[in-house]
Image (tube, helix red, strand yellow):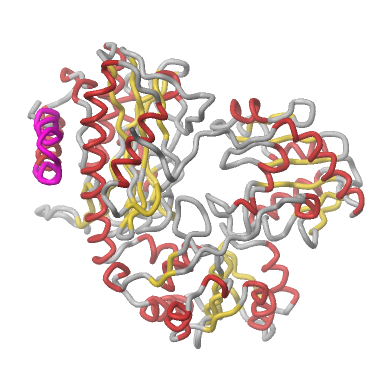
Amino acid sequence: MFDAKFQTFGDASAPALGAARLKLLRAELERRGLDGFIVPRADAHQNEYVPPCDERLAWLTGFTGSAGVALVLREEAALVVDGRYTLQAAAQLDPTAYSVVPLAETSPERWLETHLPAGAHFGYDPWLVTLDGLERLRRAVSGAGGVLVAVDGNPIDAVWADRPAAPQAPVSLRAPELAGATAQEKLTRLQSALADEKLDALVISDPHGVAWTFNIRGGDVSFTPLPLSWALVPREGRPTLFVDGRKLSNATRDGLAQIAEIAEPMLLERAVELAASGGATIRLDQATAPARLAARIEAAGGTVSKGASPVALMQAAKNAAELAGMRAAHLRDGAALTRFLAWFDREAHDGGLTEIDCVCALESFRRETGRLKDISFPTIAGAGPNGALPHYRVSEASNRPLNPGELFVIDSGAQYEDGTTDVTRTLTVGTPSDEMRDRFTRVLKGHIAIQRSVFPAGTTGAQLDPFARRSLWEAGLDFDHGTGHGVGAYLSVHEGPARISKLGTVPLQRGMVLSNEPGYYKTGAYGIRLENLEIVVDGPAIAGAERPLLSFETLTLAPFDRRGLDLTLLNPDEIAWIDTYHARVRAEIAPLLNEADRSWLIEATRPL
């Protein structure tokens, strides 16, 4: 009945080939006089999603997770992964070739310090290591008594015989009514920021920043409409956009040529050297810029200013047109999600549904809007114990039926040309236990506490994060992920620099869009997560207030599953919030539904 166009469910790993490919790499390292090599899961931009040609870690090891680092020495090799992926790594790797090292126990640098032989020459690809990463790597290798070597050409590329070609998806110009500002206006604003910081130039190494600045979108990676590209922006004069010319139509090239020089990416290094040659100070984004560019700037006599790209904050605080697009996208997406919830309620309780069935159904409802460009990340659909894995991704091997008495977590998102969505609902199958209802209600209380918060301008995500946890803490419970992340406007579903988490140090600004997604996970039993997206807006006018205030406006429109609630845990204000939110969902979504789904929504959102 339903299918999925934008995601697959096979296991793309090849653990049986791990030992043979490791042998090939070791032979290449020996030929180059190297005793070891680091293989991060990264491309030259540190993208969350990378093109197939940059999936070196997956090719080498068989591990297909989104984060990990392989450390290869002559006699041993390790894969360091965080807690999300320890079980997956153990299942995907050849245990005779690699040991799995949990990041919580040992960092890659600490592993090197204790395993790298003294005098060993340890290699790294300077295009895949950031400035901060290089400093940590240098200390670790030095601490072990080794010698750190920057390679010229990645050795994996030399032995990867069927490596895919670099992507060449067409680049498109973003419509002015969606962008809300011209690229020239953005560049003028950016160059003013460079002058304020006394910088001579900026390298935009993050393609998200390039896309936002130049009002372009592409399709070089999955789930995010990115054109892989770079930009060099001087404090004065025309910037240069470095992008594969084969991606540009005549119309796109003509549009971009009005505001920038256009060059092939292979010319980036030379351009950076020329910009630095007079002793210029050039800002490199410490989170995304490759160490290779820093070395070129310093060799040319320039100074590297290591810090955040000014683009990041400008991009995060959406303008009126971007927010209008986000609201329109969420209204459309809310109708598709509500159709799914109504379908789920009719089908799940009779049995027979699986996790993959639900993923395919939800994507199908979104595609039926006629506006879906892609999903914004692989849908997380966890039934029963699979829901206790916050970043679970269903495969044909792990696909599980939805059984009565269980909870089902579905975390999904969509890319529309006018906006990006991300929403999580936890759904009951049959009758939940009293414990499930207690935990569900505590998670929703935390969600409501974030949404209702009013806070002074300058407040950080770390200061708000405890609001989401208080009700869980009162029961001796917690969750290990952050409460919220930034979301782009038809860009990345995980956008910096602001976040609501224990580590969120960037002050929230009006126009930012963040997720609000507290959770609870009982290992081997069930998981709960409830997520809406929120816009940071001006706070209410309060008599006597001494500081400007901010608050949140909810973007996401879809009902919560009332059957998960324990009403005795909710205070009157929380009950009123749920009823008010559901009334808004009903008023805005019901006109977009057919009669059957509208009737379901009216019942699902009736006052508590």
Asked whether the viewer can see residue 80, the reply is: no
Tell me what residue is drawn at x 56 percent, y 57 percent. Answer: 287
Instruction: Please determine whether, in this image, residue 24 is positioned above or below residue 54.
Output: above
Q: Is residue 101 left or right of residue 367?
A: right
Looking at the image, can residue 96 be seen? Answer: yes
Q: Which residues are magenta?
A: 587-604
The answer to whether 215 appears left or right of 398 in the picture is: left
Measuring from the top left, give residue 17's x and y in whole percent: 75, 35
- Residue drawn 45% across the image and 50% down it: 223
Q: Nearer the viewer, residue 356 or 141?
A: 356
Question: Which residue corresponds to the image point at 44% horizontal and 45% vertical from the top-left?
Answer: 6
Q: In which quadrant is the C terminus drawn?
A: top left
Q: Residue at x 10, y 45 (%)?
A: 591
Is 479 placed left or right of 17 in the picture?
A: left
* Figure quadrant of residue 589: top left
Quadrant of the snapshot with the N terminus: top left
- Majority secondary structure of the magenta segment? helix
Q: Quadrant of residue 352?
A: top left
Q: x and y percent of residue 327 in the render?
A: 23, 55
Give the camera-side residue of 520 and 606.
606
**x, y percent for residue 127:** 68, 60
Where residue 588 sits in the image (x, y, percent)?
A: 12, 46
